[in-house]
Amino acid sequence: MKGLLIETNLFEGKIQEDASGRTLVKGVLQRAGAENQNGRVYPKNILDREVKKYQQLIQERRALGELDHPESTVINLKNVSHNIKEVHWEGDDVVGTVEILPTPSGNILKELLRAGILLGISSRGMGSTEPLSGNRVQVKEDFELLCWDFVSNPSTHGAFMRPMNESVNRKLDEQADVCGDFCRAQDLMREIITETA
């Protein structure tokens, strides 16, 4: 059965303004082929297909995301905080540039980042999973990417967003995952609630 799937990467909150005054951040949005703290794996071919489809939303300036993760497949315009400007692959990482919008939620996001608050960036999509060995599951072919949202709860090991003025090529594995077991427990509770809703 197809359900709501969410994956979160830790976001290193530093911001930069471009020449036109827009607030931008750049970094890893998602990682293919690696188990995250939810025990979920996204095959690269499936994620690549969805990234290619997502390019249409980027071209139309409709690649919007929210501040916080609703348990919904609808992007609520009153909570929109950002727009994805571009995405591309770097190895197994989906890397993107995100414009923080001057909306109420966008202004909150900007101030959190300026204050040095550690946030996550999280994909939201619809799909089903199939079991792998251990407690792992793999996302199936029916997966559909909806958006990326900013959240307080990271779940992907070693994935950090990068500020626009730093190299994205810096080794991600050198960064510590500061969330640990607490985030794993929160993710499991969210999955249980989503499955029973």
Image (tube, rainbow, N blue to C red):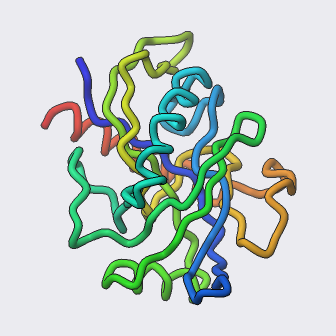
- How far across and down, in percent of the image, does residue 85 sit? 54, 61
- At 49% from the left and 19% from the top, the residue drawn is 138
User: Does 144 appear above or below 62?
Assistant: above
Task: Compare residues 155 and 32 and report the one nearer the observer.
Answer: 32
- How far across and down, in percent of the image, does residue 140 sit? 43, 16
Image quarter of the C terminus: top left
Task: Compare residues 8 and 91 and report the one nearer the observer.
Answer: 91
User: Does 150 appear above or below 55?
Assistant: below
- How far across and down, in percent of the image, does residue 98 sit? 55, 65
Left or right: residue 1 compared with residue 148: left
Task: Compare residues 62 and 175 and report the one nearer the observer.
Answer: 62
Quadrant in which residue 79 is drawn = bottom left
Pick out the residue farthest to the front: 60
Q: How many marks?
A: 0
Left or right: residue 88 compared with residue 23: right
Quadrant in which residue 102 is drawn = bottom left
Task: Compare residues 135 and 2 and report the one nearer the observer.
Answer: 2
User: Does 58 appear above or below 3?
Assistant: below
Image quarter of the N terminus: top left
- How far across and down, in percent of the image, does residue 73 sit? 23, 44
- At 86% from the left and 57% from the top, the residue drawn is 170
- At 56% from the left and 81% from the top, the residue drawn is 23
Pick out the residue farthest to the left: 197
- At 58% from the left and 50% from the top, the residue drawn is 29
